[in-house]
Image: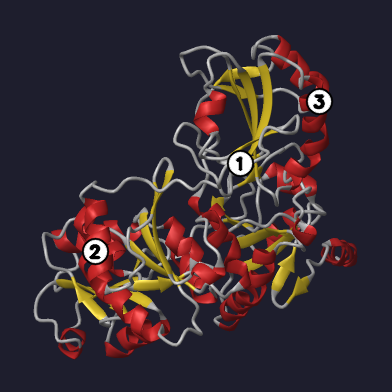
Amino acid sequence: MLKLLLLCSLAVASRAEVPEEDDVLVLKKSNLDEALSLHPNILVEFYAPWCGHCKALVPEYAKAAGMLKAEGSAIRLGKVDATEETELAQEYGVRGYPTIKFFKGGEKQSPKEYSAGRQADDIVAWLKKRTGPAVATLAGVPEAESLIADNEVAVVGFFKDAESAGAKAYEKAAESIDDIPFAMTSDEAVFSKFEVSEDSVVLFKKFDEGRNTFDGEMTKENLLAFVKANQLPLVIEFTEQTAPKIFGGEIKSHILMFLPKAASDFQDKMDQFKKAAEGFRGRILFIFIDSDVDDNQRILEFFGLKKEECPAIRLITLEDEMTKYKPDSESITAESIVEFCTRFTDGKLKPHLMSQDIPADWDKNPVKILVGKNFEEVVFNPAKNVFVEFYAPWCGHCKQLTPIWDKLAEKYKDSDDIVVAKMDSTVNEIETVKVHSFPTLKFFPAGDDRQVVDYNGERTLEGFTKFLESGGKDGGAPAGDDDDLDAEDLDDIDEGPEEDSDHEEGGDDEHDEL
């Protein structure tokens, strides 16, 4: 017996403690198995110490961990420094920061991608939906009041018969939404308290009109459409926390108002914007961006705007390709915005393509400078083979490529039919090429058929030379779709320490995503 007790004591002592910071587990490859054996359900953030978005998440992530701990929940939150634990990051396909994955039931294989917002309430609600029933049962008024008070948005199904067809459709809809709590009640006192007389679904929210009541045939599809149309404010401010809701939602047409909060007419313009939004709920998402916030400057740049040009309105679609639209008028009134949005929904708007003016010395140096206004004329010259780098000034990989690209251009500066060029794709756009990452290298061979060839070979002088000498065959491939760009990457542009993007997530990624 003594020997058995000693062996048990040694076994317990040998189990490594998983360190914590602010109730968040500090995870490594060496202790992940141990952590999952002690805590089967763990939400894990893969982060980089230099990542601005990761830093912004820290307080909300710790708050969520504390909320779960205070409730006595068995769910834990953990974090992995992916710059140190590179092997672990590569194992789980980490390509950007933060990447957040949910390990459920102690299983290490195929963790679920976290898909909700970055506020503590969003994190907790998502985890509860992932580990508990899709629909909670409200036994009485206190439970209903608590649910509504504790959540920014909550959905309650009022069903006198929990086995009815409507109730079953409601449960199916609830299973499809992770970031909003759903509940059901058959209690007469709850019906009376919230002035509901017959079977119904009500969305309660702490903004705008406060509640929305479903009206229509009770089907899963109709209920999902109802919730998704009403779960966000008429006008939502773009922040670190709201970005996942904005980009991860069903509405892919977004109108943005760039306006400094400190402006004297801020509230008036916001009222006009909100008034215009009423007629487009569920079709166009209305977003406000504070143009004075430093973190928002990259978004202004993406739309070709400067702080001094705000207030301004732009519209973008986030379907297969990002397409931007600019209103003809700079007026910000409900009437002008409604007219702009109506022309968009009617398909009467033409995309807005940015272009710099053509530099006077665009062809003076070996590397020719392209802008939107001279692109077609240069690259589709039937007598020329044109090799183009599409770059961003802030892109670390582009900076690394510059001396090689300069040498390539020097090598062919006297060629009669080869042109080496580059274009700043943050301020110039063209319909024929959609740039999703930097640098993007494309070859436009001579001829009248306007061919485009993607360069996929080594980024060396030798590799580029072989490619050009082979007429775009050695290292090339017919131009197709680049890797898809997640819309949320508009938010998650974090290049690395001191704005340089030399860090390569996963080890072999040679692009910076747009």
Mark linked to residue 106? none
Label 3 Cα crowd, 10 Å radius (few <14 / some 14-19 / many 20+) = some
Label located before the other in sequence (2 or 1) = 2
Which quadrant: the N terminus? bottom right
Q: Is residue 481 above or below residue 130?
A: above
Please name the residue that numbered disc 2 is placed on.
Answer: 280
Could you say which is closer to the camera, residue 45 or residue 10?
45
Could you say which is closer to the camera, residue 192 or residue 81?
81
Q: CA distance from mark 1 to mark 3?
A: 26 Å
Q: Is residue 140 above or below residue 504?
A: below
- Residue type pointed to by label 2: Phe
Please name the residue that numbered disc 3 is placed on.
Answer: 410
Label located before the other in sequence (2 or 3) = 2
- Residue type pointed to by label 1: Ser
Q: Quadrant of residue 414?
A: top right
Disc 3 element: helix
Please name the residue that numbered disc 1 is placed on.
Answer: 437
Image coordinates for residue 345, horizontal then vertical, percent:
23, 52
Q: Quadrant of residue 214?
A: bottom left
Label 2 Cα crowd, 10 Å radius (few <14 / some 14-19 / many 20+) = some
